[in-house]
Every structure is written in structure tokens, then in C-alpha cells.
Amino acid sequence: MYSTLRYKLESNGTTYENDNINASLLVELITNLELQEYVVLGPSELVEGSMYMQAAALEEPGQMVAEIRLQEGEDGFRHYSYSTADTTVIIQWFLDYWGKQQLPQLESWHDITHEFD
């Protein structure tokens, strides 16, 4: 199904192409996020309808946010957000997204699509 899938990883102005992305890099980048820093993982084609997954550090110490954008129709999208102090959860979501082409369970995520209108 995803035989030609490739990823691009962007973090604070640095871009990593598919062959340079591995689990250790994802863990390192997400674990060491500081305020105003981000990690965005984008597939070359939609993964279960998603365009990308991203993570960022929040102002509150130890808090992070993960976000995912799903394509909706031709030009639309839904954007979901999840804040947590548990970095390991976010790392696992990224590893599953990258390694298994699997989305997190979005039932407990917040739909923040309205913030992009």
C-alpha cells in the first residue's frame, strides 16, 4: 500500500530526507525540544488521510503538544491537537506514524481546525 512512501523531517530549520531518518533521530529531536522548537514529519503521500504530524514544546515547563492534520475533501482539512507532559507518548506516536504508517487514536485529541480559519 505504501511501497513508495518517503518521509521528510523538519526540525528548527534543518531538513532530514527519508534515508537519514531513523528511530534514534526521532527520539533525540522530540526528547530535546525546547520552547519555540518543533518537529514536523511529513509523508510523501497521505497516511490514513493525514498530511503530517508535528510536535512542539509549550511554555509550561515539561509540557508538549502533538498535532496532526487530516485531509478533508479536495481542499479542506481537520487539525487535531494533544497536550501532554509524557514525552514517551509523543515519541511512540511518531514512531508508529513513521514506522507503521499508523495514526494515534484521535478520540481524546482536540479538534482545533477553527483556529486556522
Image (cartoon, rainbow, N blue to C red):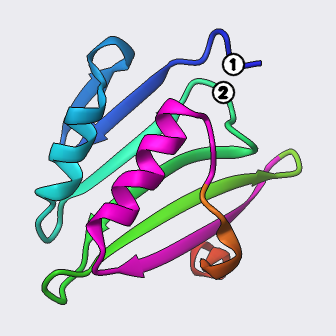
In the figure, 104 relative to 73: above or below? Answer: below
Say which residue appears at 51% left-offset and 18% top-offset: 6
Left or right side of 53 for 17: left
Please state which amino acid type lies under the numbered disc 1: Tyr
Badge 1 marks a residue whose secondary structure is loop
Please state which amino acid type lies under the numbered disc 2: Glu
Quadrant of the image occupied by residue 80: bottom right
Quadrant of the image occupied by residue 44: top right
Q: Nearer the viewer, residue 38 or 47?
A: 47
Task: Tell which residue pokes out farthest to the bottom in this image.
Answer: 60
Q: Nearer the viewer, mark 2 or mark 1?
A: 1
Say which residue appears at 49% left-offset and 51% top-offset: 53
Residue hosting label 2: 45
Q: Quadrant of the C terminus?
A: bottom right
Crowd class of label 1 (few under 14; some 14 to 19; many from 20; radius 10 Å): few
The answer to whether residue 68 shows anywhere in this view is: yes
The answer to whether residue 12 shows anywhere in this view is: no
Q: Earlier in the sequence, mark 2 or mark 1?
A: 1
In magenta segment, residue 88: yes
Badge 2 marks a residue whose secondary structure is loop
Q: CA distance from mark 2 to mark 1?
A: 8 Å
Contact, mark 2 vs mark 1 (Cβ under 8 Å): yes
Q: Position of residue 75 (x, y in %)?
A: 80, 49
Say which residue appears at 26% left-offset and 29% top-offset: 15
Residue hosting label 1: 2
Say which residue appears at 38% left-offset and 46% top-offset: 40
Crowd class of label 2 (few under 14; some 14 to 19; many from 20; radius 10 Å): some
Q: Which residues are magenta?
A: 75-103
In the figure, 76 relative to 74: above or below? Answer: below
Quadrant of the image occupied by residue 36: bottom left
Q: Position of residue 79 (x, y in %)?
A: 63, 66
